Amino acid sequence: MANVLAILICGFLGGSLRYWLGEVIPTGAGFPWSLVLINLLGSGLLAWLSHARRLTAKWPEALTVGLGVGGVGAFTTFSTFSLTTVNLLEKQQWGLATAYLAVTVLGGLVCSTLGVWSARRWWGLPLVEP
């Protein structure tokens, strides 16, 4: 029950933060900057959380599940990412669609890698598992 409650609370916070960032970050030249930022931050944060949980058993499971599934799950926007890409393609904005895909996918991989490295460094472990 603690996990469900943590997901509920963190999901509310993650979804609210996603909405707020979407409102305050301008969309320049039709490029969905707020969604890119949200996806990149979410990629790094989810990687950090999942790796941190593997590195330490000190965190309560409800905290890790709540933040990961609830908070980051509600914060990130893969379904919105897909729909935004389709919308750009329907408008025949090939360059923007390609840039959006490249920045989001490659940036997400970079941010996930940084999240893993950051978690390992936090606990004083080598950046790469032996």
Image (tube, helix red, strand yellow):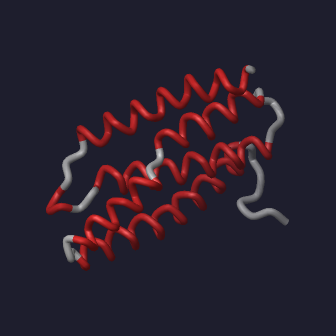
Point out the residue furthest to the left here. 29
Counting from the top left corner in percent of width and height, residue 51 is at 71, 49
* Residue drawn where x is 75% and y is 20% of the image: 1
Q: Quadrant of residue 17?
A: top left
Q: Position of residue 41 (x, y in %)?
A: 46, 49
Q: How many marks?
A: 0
Left or right, 50 with reference to 100: right
Q: Is residue 105 left or right of residue 54?
A: left
Q: Quadrant of residue 82?
A: bottom left
Q: Is residue 90 above or below residue 1?
A: below
User: Residue 50, relative to residue 83: is it above or below?
Assistant: above
Q: Whole-percent x and y of residue 75? A: 47, 41
Q: Residue at x 33, y 67 (%)?
A: 86
Q: Is 99 above or below relative to 46?
A: below
Residue at image coords 55%, 28%: 10
Nearer-the-camera pick, 99 or 130: 99
Measuring 23% from the left and 38% from the top, which residue is drawn there? 24
Q: Residue furthest front?
A: 90
